[in-house]
Amino acid sequence: MVINASGLFYLAGLQNLDYQVYEAAQIDGANGWQTFWKITVPQLRPVIIMTFIMSINGTLQLYDESVNLTNGGPAGTTMTMSHHIYNTAFLGKPNFGYASALSFVVFILVAILAAINLKVGDKRD
């Protein structure tokens, strides 16, 4: 069985859950669905947010697979943002200014998505 990094984070998060809360919920008559949504998911919220941010960042920075497997694919259908930025900066007629502007847009996009995820995940009482 192959476990990726996100799965490993979820397994670690599940191992750190407090089982006394589950016992109390069972005594109070909660079913499995209620236990999952009212106890498990809120306790795993930091792990969910972290893996979501890491997934977004990893996807926006994806380069190697696109280049090595398909080199952008038929008519650029498998070209990622990072691959397009590289092609704009270094291949054909180089345009460093446009490539750096695209890189800055990716940076801003990652920062905005991370801020939204942190704001949504911050449930301090």
Image: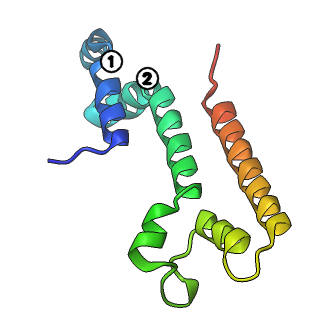
Q: In the rendering, which numbered label is found on residue 43?
A: 2
Residue under the image location 31 percent in, 25 percent down: 12
- The kind of secondary structure element at disc 2 is helix
In the displayed structure, would residue 41 be above or below residue 123? below
- The kind of secondary structure element at disc 1 is loop
Q: In the rendering, which numbered label is found on residue 17?
A: 1
- As rendered, which of 103 and 39 lies closer to the eye? 103
Q: Is residue 84 visible?
A: yes
Residue under the image location 53 percent in, 56 percent down: 59
Q: Is residue 30 visible?
A: no
User: Could you tell me residue 25's position as x and y percent?
Assistant: 31, 18
In the displayed structure, would residue 67 be above or below residue 7? below
CB under 8 Å between callouts 2 and 1? yes
Q: Along the horizontal axis of the image, is 3 left or right of 110?
A: left
Q: Along the horizontal axis of the image, is 79 left or right of 9?
A: right
Residue under the image location 36 percent in, 32 percent down: 9
Task: Report the amino acid beneath label 2.
Answer: Gln
Q: Quadrant of the C terminus?
A: top right
- As rendered, which of 65 and 53 lies closer to the eye? 65
Task: Classify mark 1: residues with Cα within 10 Å, few (<14), some (14-19) or many (20+).
Answer: some
- As rendered, which of 55 and 30 lies closer to the eye? 55
Q: Earlier in the sequence, mark 2 or mark 1?
A: 1
The outermost residue toward the bottom is 75
Task: Report the amino acid beneath label 1.
Answer: Leu
